[in-house]
Image (tube, coloured by chain):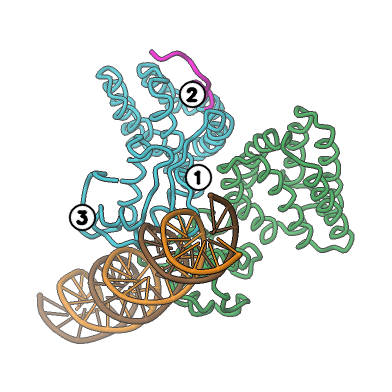
Chain colours: A cyan, B green, C orange, D brown
DNA sequence: CGACAGCCGATTGTCGACAGTCGTCTAGCT
DNA sequence: AGCTAGACGACTGTCGACAATCGGCTGTCG
């Protein structure tokens, strides 16, 4: 365990920061499934005490990225294709269907502009071949809508599911998605949202997630 | 905040114990939505330090039973009918469909006997009008199957969803379910499981959860 | 009378120390 | 050599103390 990046946080919500760093390390594959996580080491590495680290680990455990055995530490988990396709994706669809429906009447012009900007960013990232930036914009696109739905639990569950989905595509199925198609789909989805037709949006979201995360197509 | 029951734990996994007590207090309605939760008070009440209490609160937050505002404490949340029907129930169905399918070939004779015993217990509880015992047996029935599926994440997500569903039916929609029907449905479900016909089981699970938790019928 | 800076109490966030638990390694016995 | 009791090391679990933050209260000044 060395070099997770970043040291000392100025002094503000270290817990969250620790969680972010570890999550990034895990979803990126820098910490592979099976790797052991030792509170003291992580704390030292990040220049904090064990308390924030413990809380971050519990968070990651809830997200299904790690397991922890009492008195014996934690380890990074893998994600199976079965699980992603049969559980995580359907759950995401359920959550997003509900959240998009709730969000639709609440989206402001400003929100739409932000979504547009994110879709554009995806397009640029796709062209430049930056899977990183593509995925980031993708996540922020969906998250913005879910935030606007003002459904606390939905946001929370989404944040619980999403890291595992991302870990799967980054670690276990890289190049699974066609970047250009992803960007294009978001533009289309945005158009449907602009139309304001709720039924169409829900259908679009579902199709979007399915083709986006669904069972294998060939890499581009 | 007084009288959540139970004091001092001998000395073993206090965190879990704290979480259980609080979860029970919340789902039972003893702690109503809006109630404030103060770490120090809870710790004193239960005779521990704040550390286990903090972790329990984080757990409950993940389960969506409470929210916590940085530096300003936590409060008990309510659950809306919309959310239960449109999000929690569909997610439960997704999880259980997958878990039942995986569990089916792994269920031993012994497991079936246990399930039978739980269904019988539900029947007795229904007759005696004990909603408590009915719900407990119900939960253990489903949880046993999910445990046998050996899908770690499924079990975990199920445990994340389930307390909120239970809180809803205990606090906000008591008498919503027909006890006799619940018991009967589990017996039927068990029969289908015994038949070993996977497709039939999945269909049965779905119908079961829908009628069991679905949109309103009249109380018995 | 009202706005506003600064203080105060309540409560969480973080820390360092110590207690408890588990797996392993070892020494002594047979 | 094989086996078991106990010691050891590596961690996590828990604790009590202290730091940081927030919202409300207060006193001052215009």
SS at badge 2: helix
Closer to the chain start, of discs 1 and 3, is 3
Horizontal relation, residue B137 to residue A149: left or right: right
What residue sits right under mark 2 in the picture? A208
Highlighted magenta segment, given as a residue range? A206-220
x and y percentages locating residue B128 in the rendered image: 88, 63
Horizontal relation, residue B31 to residue A143: left or right: right
Closer to the chain start, of discs 1 and 2, is 1
Up the image or down, B135 lies above or below C27; here it is above
x and y percentages locating residue B153 in the rendered image: 55, 42
What residue sits right under mark 3 in the picture? A8
x and y percentages locating residue A148 in the rendered image: 42, 42
Given contact means CB atoms under 8 Å apart, are the residues at marks 1 and 2 in contact?
no
- Nearer the viewer's eye, disc 3 or disc 2? 3
- Nearer the viewer's eye, disc 1 or disc 2? 1
SS at badge 3: loop
Residue found at x 23% / y 44%: A5
Quadrant containing the C terminus of chain A is: top left
Residue found at x 78% / y 61%: B133
Check chain identity for marks 1 and 2: say if they share one: yes
């Amino acid at each position: 365990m060395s070099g997770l990046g970043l040291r000392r946080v100025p002094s503000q919500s270290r817990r969250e920061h620790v969680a972010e760093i570890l999550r990034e390390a895990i979803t990126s594959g820098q910490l592979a499934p099976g790797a052991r996580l030792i509170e003291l080491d992580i704390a030292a590495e990040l220049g904090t005490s064990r308390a924030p680290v413990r809380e971050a680990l519990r968070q990651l455990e809830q997200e299904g990225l790690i397991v922890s055995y009492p008195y014996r530490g934690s380890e990074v988990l893998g994600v199976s294709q079965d699980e992603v396709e049969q559980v995580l994706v359907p759950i995401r669809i359920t959550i997003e269907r509900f959240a998009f429906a709730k969000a639709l009447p609440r989206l402001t012009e400003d929100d739409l502009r932000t979504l547009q900007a994110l879709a554009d960013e995806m397009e640029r990232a796709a062209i430049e071949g930056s899977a990183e930036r593509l995925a980031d914009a993708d996540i922020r696109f969906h998250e913005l809508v879910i935030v606007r739905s003002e459904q606390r639990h939905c946001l929370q569950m989404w944040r619980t599911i999403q890291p595992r989905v991302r870990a799967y595509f980054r670690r276990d199925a890289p190049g699974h998605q066609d970047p250009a198609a992803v960007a294009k789909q978001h533009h289309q989805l945005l158009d449907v949202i602009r139309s304001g037709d709720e039924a169409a949006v829900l259908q679009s979201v579902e199709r979007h997630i399915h083709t986006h995360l669904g069972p294998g197509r060939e890499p581009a």
